[in-house]
Amino acid sequence: MLRIFVLSLFAVSCVSAGKRTISHVVPQQQVQSTHQHVVIADHGSYEAAGGYDHHGAVAYDDGKGGSTGAELTSLAHSSAVQAKNAVQNQHTQGSQAAYGVKSSLASAALGAAQTAQAALVGKQAIVQNLKRQAIEAQSRLQGEISQYHQMEQAAVAAQEAAQQAQGLVGSLTAALATAQAGADKSHHAAAESANAAAAQHEMVNDAKQKVAGIIGQLQSALGDLQETEAAAYKAAESAQIAQSNAAAAGLAVAVAGAKGAAHAAAASGGDYYQHGHGHGHH
């Protein structure tokens, strides 16, 4: 339980670290949904919110109701798309204010990558919880099977005792009343044991179905986890490319400014020389 709570705090801190103020004008669809966090309840289950709340939080449950872990995978995919779009928009921007726009797009891509990372942490928490449930269910199943075998053996033993007692009825007519009483008791005990064994067998079947369901959820979650990891990696890669493009654009602006200053200085020196030479001639 504490480990899940620590994972939630780590996800929140990762997203909070990515928050920053963007002073340039960026299209709304490129910067929205860049600051989200994953909320994991401390009581062992995940709160189902079905998307984003007014604080930008992403909530999910453990598959019992409401939203599922698939929303985290969808969030990671959408974040990767946002980061990739930010990189593509860097290439399509005009020369006007290229550095400012690319810096803003780099910030948007970084925020999308951090959102994908938070979704990855949430998906890992779901997988760990399902693994723990599978182990616990397997342990309960083994216990139920063991009890069923014991009760089954007791039922067989009671049935054998009932058959032996019934045989005594035919051979011992003198002790018919006593033998019959013993046979009746044995039959009653056998019936109770058989009923208990049947009930235990039903519990074993229920436990098997539960284990199969949890294992199915675990396999699905593992598949989603792989997709989420791939999306998070693509988002981080796109964010790195965007930052590199922004740095290159800034360097280009600086070089262009330096060249402009050099040309201005050269032009100013030529005018001064021509003005002085004209005075000497007169």
Image: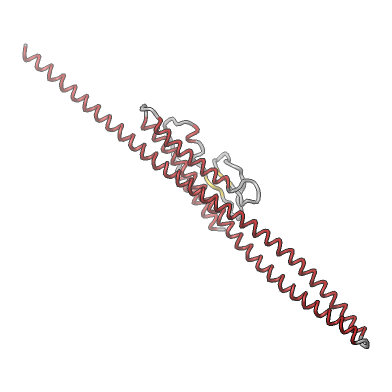
Judging depth in this view, the residue of 87 and 31 nearest the camera is 87
Side (left or right) of 206 relative to 11: right
The residue sitting at 34% across, 38% down in the picture is 247
**Residue farthest to the top, as pictured:** 282
The quadrant of the rendering that contains the C terminus is top left
83 above or below 188? above
Q: How far from the left and from the top, in percent, is residue 275? A: 13, 16
Locate residue 235, reporting x and y percent: 45, 43
> Which of the 4 image quarters holds residue 24?
top left
How far from the left and from the top, in percent, is residue 185?
Answer: 86, 78
Q: Residue at x 36, y 37 (%)?
A: 245
Query: On screen, 86 above or below 234?
Result: above
**Vertical placement of residue 239 versus 157, above or below:** above
- Residue ranking furthest to the left: 281
Q: Position of residue 180 (x, y in %)?
A: 90, 81
Quarter of the image that includes the N terminus: bottom right
